[in-house]
Amino acid sequence: MKYPVIADTNFDELRDVVLPNMNKFSIIGDELSTSAHIKNLAKLMPNLKELHVGLANDGFGMVCKVWNKLENLQIHPFQVDERGLLGTEFGEKCYHTPNITDLQGKSRNFDGK
């Protein structure tokens, strides 16, 4: 059975907690992190250098906005399209991608595997 770890986290209870020395965070599974989830994670772990989560366009955009020290980003499940990768909305640049030296994405096949 799979549980939505980030979605089920009560970030209100963690509002006064900051983990400044945490530089790596991974969630393995099928959960997609929304922009709100990423914003909350960034408040909790502002100095991440390595992140492994599932993302779609909105979550990827927030990652680009909140973690400028990020070096390694592994996205699984990967639901980021060209618009998300380029940071454009209606032809306008919404964000700049950070100086990520290692970006990996793995999407599921159409049969869900």
Image (spheres, rainbow, N blue to C red):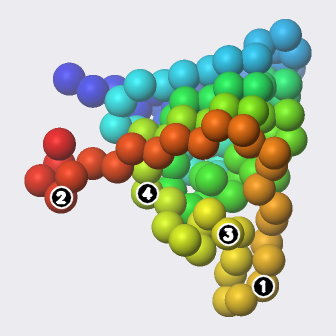
Q: CA distance from mark 1 to mark 4?
A: 21 Å
Rendered image: mark on residue 110: 2
Q: Find disc 4 in the rendering and name its residue.
A: 79
Secondary structure beneath disc 4? strand
Q: CA distance from mark 1 to mark 2?
A: 31 Å
Residue 82 higher or lower than 108, as above or below: below
Secondary structure beneath disc 3? helix
Q: CA distance from mark 3 to mark 4?
A: 14 Å
Kindly indicate the quadrant of the structure image that contains residue 45. Answer: top right
Q: Earlier in the sequence, mark 1 or mark 2?
A: 1
Question: Which residue of the protein is positioned furthest toward the left in this rendering?
Answer: 111
Secondary structure beneath disc 1? strand
Q: What is the crowding at mark 2: few (fewer than 14 residues within 10 Å), some, or many (at least 20)?
A: few
Q: CA distance from mark 3 to mark 1?
A: 10 Å
Q: Find disc 3 in the rendering and name its residue.
A: 86
Q: Are marks 3 and 2 in contact (CB under 8 Å)?
A: no
Q: Are marks 1 and 2 in contact (CB under 8 Å)?
A: no
The amino acid pointed to by label 4 is: Gln
The amino acid pointed to by label 2 is: Phe
Q: Residue at x 55, y 30 (%)?
A: 52
Res 17 visible: no
Q: Is residue 109 left or right of residue 30?
A: left
Q: Position of residue 86 (x, y in %)?
A: 67, 69
Q: CA distance from mark 3 to mark 2?
A: 24 Å
The residue mark sitting in front, 3 or 4, is 3
